[in-house]
Image (cartoon, grey):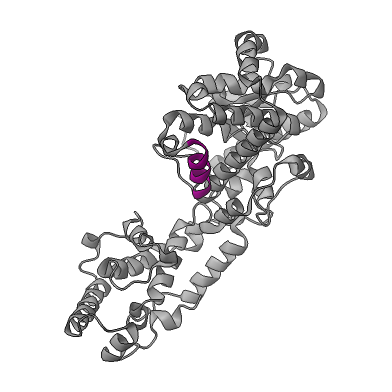
Amino acid sequence: MEPPLRLHDISNRLIDVCDTIIEDQQFIINNNKNNKNVNNEYSKNGKKYKLTSDGNFIRVQGEDKHLIISNSYENFKFNYSILSSYSILKNCGNILIDYPKLSLAIIFTSREIELNKWYDESSKILIAEQNPSINLNNLIENFEFDSINYISNIDSNLRSQLINLGSLILTATKINFFQTDHNVTSPTLEGYALRKLIFDNFGENALNSIDIYNALRAFSHWCSIKGIFYKLNLPNLKINNILIHNFKTFPLIPFWIKDSLYGRYPAGCSKLSLIKKSIKIISNSIYGKLIEFPNYLNFKTFNDLCNDIELDPLKYHIRSATLNLSINLPLEINKIFSNSNIWLEFISSILQAIGNYKLPFENNNNNSNNNLIVSNKILKIKFLKDKKLYQSTCQLVNKIQNLEKLNNNKLNDKQLLDLLGGSVQNSISSVCQF
């Protein structure tokens, strides 16, 4: 039996393995620069990976939903994108029949993706000239007649409208990705912009259509994430000049869609967003003046972090590092905001004790505060009932309710505050100045 390896020997072997991997990757990169026909993909354990322009490998999944395109002007005449998008939609239930307007928007927009090169290495596309394994003859034989017939009789004006609609839908899915790390959701579509576009154009039932979900799930991956982020004016985006040039032809995005981007923090930062919204609502209520802000929490540090996220959101996105989204160093919010559970317990104790009683509503929307309490990040009462803050807040609510009953519910917040002895020192309202 061989003697066990020493730690020093194990370390040297690991270094040798790393050196080999680096050498192999550098060899692939150098060959890829000098040889356009080099294979920039490999398979391992049944999984396929492709090389990106940054020298990293990313997983290739679901190629049956990848859009087949040409990157050669002389081959645009074969209409690969039209045939491919039609074939993919044909496998999405009855969408071609039930939702022809959406189907046409997807098909025509896929053609624009091909012609204008609105894609990059993150897009789920297959370039015909770089993938000799694609059976193009089969694609043409099986789908050319039906797909061309499907899009015939569409005049140029309607075609432009459909391309605009398809482009806005793509934009809405990327806003979803920015906010939630998902382009589309099931069983119902989510995201303000996407829901509004689908509802306004296809009706309420479309929001729950599995066929539309499957179609949008494929469609949303054909376009460059960075290209759309650029059109949305996201700051500090890492994007090359070629992609910027290609997206000059992308349709103008309405203000209301751009504005919806900032309704939520980037994916991975939802806890901070929830905490900030909760504190603002509590601070603007009578409770903000009657509940002391705990000395074990640092509001300034929290607020500075929120401000930085709002100024430079991409570096905090959960996919910032893997997708190389930001010109700035990506940051892991879980490491920076490591005491998030303490903050969540603080706001949960107050919100669960208060319910909706005497909380100001945002934007006159009576559901806004309900949404805070039902959030899966807000702790349930069973975990809070023995907490001192929860108990003291329940007592405070009872005092306010009793005072209002004694005065026939005619007291305003100022009168209630006076009867309760005025604002406490270091109240939430006085400390938490956003």
Total number of numbered labels? 0
Percent across and percent down for residue 163 are 66, 34
| 335 up-or-down from 98: above or below | below
Q: Is 12 included in the stretch rendered in magenta?
A: no
Q: Quadrant of the N terminus?
A: top left
Q: Residue at x 34, y 71 (%)?
A: 359
User: Which residue occupies the foreground of this view, 67 or 98?
Assistant: 98
User: Which residue occupies the foreground of this view, 404 or 4?
Assistant: 404
Mostly what secondary structure, the magenta segment? helix
Q: Residue at x 69, y 38 (%)?
A: 55
Tell whether 74 sits left or right of 275: right
Percent across and percent down for residue 168 are 61, 42
| 144 up-or-down from 283: above or below | above
Q: Quadrant of residue 312?
A: bottom right
Q: Residue at x 51, y 71 (%)?
A: 303
Tell whether 36 sits left or right of 325: right
Q: Quadrant of residue 70?
A: top right
Residue segment shown in magenta: 192-202
Percent across and percent down for residue 41 are 65, 26
Q: Residue at x 21, y 60 (%)?
A: 382
Q: Is residue 182 visible?
A: no
User: Which residue occupies the foreground of this view, 380 or 220?
Assistant: 220
Q: Quadrant of residue 360?
A: bottom left
Q: Is residue 128 visible?
A: yes
| 227 up-or-down from 291: above or below | above
Tell whether 158 sits left or right of 8: right
